[in-house]
Image (tube, rainbow, N blue to C red):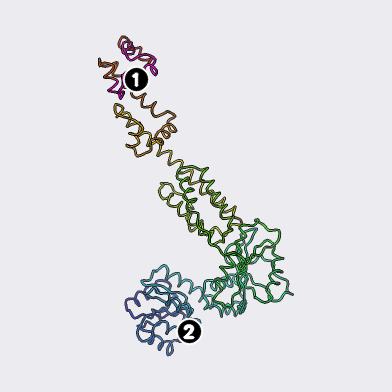
Amino acid sequence: MYTAIIVDDESVARHGISTLLSKHSPLWKIVGSFADGQSALQFIKKTCNSLDLIISDICMPNMNGLELIRVAKTLHPSVSVIFVSGYDEFEYARSALTLKADAFLLKPLVSKEFYQELDRILEIRKLQSQNADFPSSNPPHRISYLNFLFNELLRGNISIRPLFESIVCQIPPSYHIVVLKSAVSYLQDNSSFNLPPENISNPFFVFSIEPSYFALILTSEGGDAQLQQFAQINPHFFFGISQRKLDAKELSIAYQEAYIAVNQSLYSQAIPKKYKIFIYQELKSKSIPFPQELCIRIVNAMGAGDLSSAENGLTLFFTAIRKERLPINQLEDWIKRLLYLISNLVEQTPFEFPGYDVNNIIKKLPCFQTLEEIHLFFSTYTLEITKQMQVLLKKRHHTKIEQIKQYVHIHYAEDLSLERLSEHFGISASHISNLFHTVTGTKLISYITNIRLEEAKKLLRNTDDCIYHIALQVGFSDAGYFNRIFKKEVGISPKTYRNFTKNDTNNLRQF
């Protein structure tokens, strides 16, 4: 069992937190619930021999949460702390970090966020309780344990530093973080490294961060030579080195710097002939504006089903990235912004694109070895979406053409100029003309003329109306023009057609 106390001046809040904690796991035992820090502290001093978790509000009478935790940490240094507050203020959050709190959550509590923090705290507690058996634990478990501790430090959880230093190594007063990226395969753990010979002092422990990424702590004095030796026996790795840090609280910042540095390898060859080291301090600090207009052109081309223009735009996009050698954080930002523009297009279609999730795609980026691989990966989505847009547009175009045909069949006697059709269908005159010809293979004016002539034939056969009136009834305002078009298309004049078909209906087959 793991013991916890709840401190909040609102009884409703205490009850709610208690309910959530009890539902989370039967491993939690609530040993106290208090309305202010002072009464909670008295309980801790007099009654509580061991304590695993304090969940506390900040603003309370008598003694606030910050003061409570400051004293409680002297009595129980390893106690985990979750602050809950109704005030989203920077000063509160900063004070919570100073006190090495595990989490700072806002009221009302979101159960999912609360449970995530509780899961993490339970994991730490379980590992701490297993620490006594650590030396005898099997190697895979030991490696997993050490990796977990190091990753917690990178998350900013400095409260486990004593545990980390007691079984792994001391964090030196002056250090660098080195991030290693595999150039040959997606290594899942740190069991595949060639470690330095025993005659090298202070051998490195390589921590696994994520597939293909590893990290180690490098002392600022004498560490360069050791790193060179380590790199020489692990040639198929890229190395990124952070700036020098003087405080263990900066581990997370140091890791981000080393991570940014090592990903400059995206602009190198996939498999280096020898190790390559990238130093964060040597990277040029620059902010390159996002190519918004280019990305809009890419998305518009995809929406129009224009694969060639979309691919050309994407090539320009990645060429700009390579030219500027964007750091990985800015590269991810650019790609994320382009993905969101594409997402707006995807949401307008009835199609589903399995795997197309912006956050999932961004998470995959660090696994690629070169910018060309990212470009190829991105092109796959572009191709799939653009092809689906072509299918969708084809259906839409056919639907629109059928609407135009239906309109012509009904309104053939009226003005059917391109301008009139453009106004009716809300499409430009040139687009209507081009679209009709592309889909049907026939010019729109020819189609309209054919419909009018067929209607004229019916009137010539079935009525005694004069040629002039028939021309007007089928949409020709000029009888002379009607006569010329009729003879050109049918082969005989309207008058001859009437006489010929009235005398013998079998002659209809010829016209």
Find numbered disc 1 in the image and state the secondary structure of the residue it sits on: helix
- Compare residues 351 and 315 and report the one nearer the observer: 315
Q: Quadrant of the C terminus?
A: top left
The x, y position of residue 140, in whole percent, is 61, 69
The x, y position of residue 220, in whole percent, is 65, 75
Q: Residues within 10 Å of mark 1 (few under 14, many from 20)?
A: few
Q: Quadrant of residue 499?
A: top left
Q: Amino acid under label 1? A: Tyr
Q: Amino acid under label 2? A: Lys
Name the magenta segment's main secondary structure: helix
Q: How many marks?
A: 2
State the residue position of label 2.
73
Q: Quadrant of residue 304?
A: top left
- The mark closer to the camera, 2 or 1, is 1
Q: Residues within 10 Å of mark 2 (few under 14, many from 20)?
A: some
Give the alpha-carbon distance from disc 2 to disc 1, as whole Å. 100 Å
Find numbered disc 2 in the image and state the secondary structure of the residue it sits on: helix
- Compare residues 31 and 232 and report the one nearer the observer: 232
Discs 2, 1 touching: Cβ within 8 Å:
no
The x, y position of residue 450, in whole percent, is 37, 23
Magenta stretch in the rendered image: 471-500
The x, y position of residue 284, in whole percent, is 59, 64
State the residue position of label 1.
481
Q: Quadrant of residue 168?
A: bottom right
